[in-house]
Image (cartoon, rainbow, N blue to C red):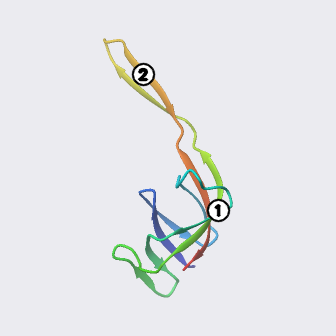
Amino acid sequence: MEFAVIKTGGKQYKVAKGDSIKIEKLSNTAKIGDKIAFEEVLLVDNGKDTTIGTPFIKGAKVEATIEEIGKLPTVTVIHYKQKSRYFKKNGHRQPFFKVKINSIK
């Protein structure tokens, strides 16, 4: 089974062809069905040999298609200081892209 390790959004993901992963939002202009390419490939394993980058593999590319654009569930953020009547409550919904991996080159 061929797989690769890619870097995007400050995180690393182990991906194989056909996988669907949720990644950080890439741009405001991207739409569902757009094709994207990840150039920052750290490792590729095709079952026989393993290629490790220093830090990235030159010429390696992972291509994917955007399946879904959405937001994760709300995370409540509370700031509180006792005895001073200071209380703030905010919510945050992190945006994400769900992408399907098409090929590893």
Q: Relative to 62, does residue 50 appear above or below in the rendering?
A: below
Instruction: Determine whether the residue tagged by mark 1 lies in a helix, strand or loop.
Output: loop
Q: Relative to 9, does residue 88 appear above or below in the rendering?
A: above
- The residue labelled by disc 2 is 88
Instruction: Determine whether the residue tagged by mark 2 lies in a helix, strand or loop.
Output: strand
Figure quadrant of residue 11: bottom left
Q: Position of residue 22 (x, y in %)?
A: 57, 55
Marking on residue 85: none
- In the picture, measured across the screen, residue 58 lies left or right of residue 23, that is left
Residue pictured at 32% horizontal, 16% vertical: 82
Marking on residue 34: 1
- In the picture, measured across the screen, residue 63 lies left or right of residue 42, that is right
Q: Amino acid at mark 2?
A: Lys
Residue pictured at 66% horizontal, 54% vertical: 68
Q: Amino acid at mark 1?
A: Asp
Q: Position of residue 91 (x, y in %)?
A: 51, 31
Which is nearer the N-term, disc 1 or disc 2?
A: 1
Q: Position of residue 96 (x, y in %)?
A: 56, 50
